[in-house]
Image (cartoon, helix red, strand yellow):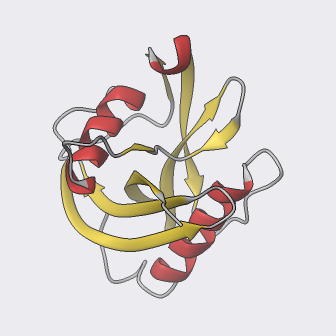
Amino acid sequence: MKFTDKACPVLLRKREGRLQILAFRHPKAGCQIVKGTVEEDEEPRQTVLRELWEESGIEGARVIEPLGQLLFHKDEQRWHLFLCEVKRDLPDAWVHYTTDGGGHNFAFFWHDLHEVPGDEWYPMFRSALAFLRERFGGEENRHAY
């Protein structure tokens, strides 16, 4: 089976003792985290920074470390997740216009990583959040995001 490679930048912050992940509401496809297709001339590590800029407008991010891969057999996708950071505080919420898919306003917010996502999240994104919850479950007190 040939998988389409996708790359996901993971931005985290800690507020009031809770670990939060950057997420957005797509006007037609519910709540998501940033994700995009790895182009033929790219490595996933490059894709995460490009997609973060294209989908959120965030510039100046850097990759900290790879977090792992998720395989979605039904959708024939392989997601590469990378922990990223930005050296400035990001707002609690903002809207970014992206030209992807004909143009959309993506409404960004911070989702509590340990809160189980509801039905407004597409199943693949719920799986990615579960993977990240497990990955960071015992670490939120050891890192200052």
Please report the residue visible at 69 percent of the width from the left and 65 percent of the height from the top.
115
Q: Is residue 91 shown above or below 110?
A: above
Nearer to us in this view, 84 or 6? 6
- The single residue placed furthest to the right in the displayed view is 119
Q: Is residue 100 visible?
A: yes
- Name the image quarter holding the C terminus: bottom left
Nearer to us in this view, 14 or 129? 129
Q: Is residue 42 shown above or below 83?
A: above
x%, y% of residue 117?
73, 58
In-image side of 117 versus 107 (left or right) = right
- Name the image quarter holding the N terminus: bottom right
Please report the residue visible at 16 percent of the width from the left and 38 percent of the height from the top.
60
- The single residue placed furthest to the front in the displayed view is 1
- The single residue placed furthest to the bottom in the displayed view is 138
x%, y% of residue 14?
42, 61
| Count of numbered marks | 0
Which corner quadrant of the image does residue 13 belong to?
Answer: bottom left
In-image side of 90 versus 61 (left or right) = right
In-image side of 124 versus 64 (left or right) = right
Q: Is residue 16 visible?
A: no
Q: Is residue 27 shown above or below 138?
A: above
x%, y% of residue 108?
52, 33
x%, y% of residue 51?
34, 37
Please report the residue visible at 54 percent of the width from the left and 69 percent of the height from the top.
71
